[in-house]
Image (spheres, grey):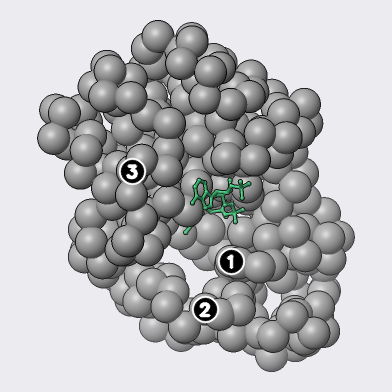
Amino acid sequence: LRLGVAGWPVAHSRSPVMQNAALHALGLGDWRYQLLPLPPALFDQTVAALPANGFRGINVTIPYKQAALALADAASAAATATGAANTLLLQPDGTVVADNTDAPALRAAIAERLPLPGLSVFVLGAGGSARAAVWALTAAGADVHVWNRTASRAADLCAAIGGRPLAGLAAVATLRSVDLIVNCTSVGLRPEDELSALPLSPRLLGGARLVVDLVYGKHETPLIAAARAAGVETLGGLEILVRQGALALELFTGRKAPLAVMRAAVGL
Ligand code: NAP
């Protein structure tokens, strides 16, 4: 049986190493998880051909999260509400069911550390991962503020999903303190990225109880470094990657995901 991750480009993905380690630990020796590098013109037709080639499900990443939802026959509440799917379940009869495990993964990782109802949250970004974060956290009763470099996108996101947009730096300055900061921008992805690209004063950062950075790479991100230096608890992007992968694996196989094995496989 086959599983995989579709993207373009996708060669850098850590999902195969993580998922194959999990499949091995579960004793599912006849399952394989592979890279599916698909150029955009081939996405829909390749997904349609996967079930006949032994595929039970795939994860999808950039740039296919919207396209994956669009081609599905049915979708979970998380995928519908966020407008994006990162998991496709391929039924033997050819039916495709879309899900989004990014949102529940983030919610679960945070909820283990802080109670969500009433929590004051500052989300940075208004792209796909911000939509998942805002949906997951507002649905759990948190009070979510959203800033984005392009302010109109934050306003659109909040109108569609929830949360309160902070239009510009003056609006951010009115935030006295927050419990949780979640970086959903790509700032930190490149080695030259600087924390000054984000409107986070030392007071706001230092007063938080938890800082989450969805970005991960070879090196610690500037946000995680600054939060740790300020003595604030942190949660990095690799842990969220492991959590979304674990939830997807459970949907694919019906088995409980071995989180510790998956963390070790990505070097956590
Ligand atoms: P996306 O849809 O492309 O959105 C990118 C966001 O980053 C936008 O809000 C954009 O603002 C902002 N941005 C880009 N460059 C910026 C800069 N120099 N200064 C300020 N803001 C900037 O991306 P996404 O899918 O939401 O992903 C965002 C990041 O999260 C990526 O680095 C991705 O690798 C990571 N991620 C991690 C996981 C995980 O499992 N750990 C899951 C999903 C995503 P504008 O609207 O102004 O362009």
Q: Quadrant of residue 7?
A: bottom right
The amino acid at mark 3 is Leu
The amino acid at mark 1 is Thr
Residue that badge 2 annotates: 10
Please state the horizontal and vertical placement of residue 134, each as a whole percent of the image: 59, 32
Please state the horizontal and vertical placement of residue 40, each as a whole percent of the image: 74, 80
The amino acid at mark 2 is Val
List the single residue furthest toward the bottom.
53
Task: In the rendered structure, find residue 98 and report the number of the disc placed on it.
Answer: none
Instruction: Determine whether label 2 and label 3 are within 8 Å by CB.
Output: no
Q: CA distance from mark 2 to mark 3?
A: 27 Å
Residue 116 shows in the view: yes
Disc 2 is placed on an element classified as: loop
* Residue closer to the observer: 152 or 74: 152
Check disc 3: other Cα within 10 Å, few if <14, some if 14-19, many if 20+. some
**What residue sits 53% from the left and 58% below the top?**
248
Left or right for 267, reference 45: left
Which image quarter holds the C terminus?
A: bottom left
Task: In the rendered structure, find residue 61 and report the number of the disc placed on it.
Answer: 1
Task: In the rendered structure, find residue 195 and report the number of the disc placed on it.
Answer: 3
Check disc 2: other Cα within 10 Å, few if <14, some if 14-19, many if 20+. some
Question: Is ligand 1 less than 8 Å from the beta carbon at label 1?
Answer: yes
Please state the horizontal and vertical placement of residue 143, each as a whole percent of the image: 54, 15
Which image quarter holds the N terminus?
A: bottom right
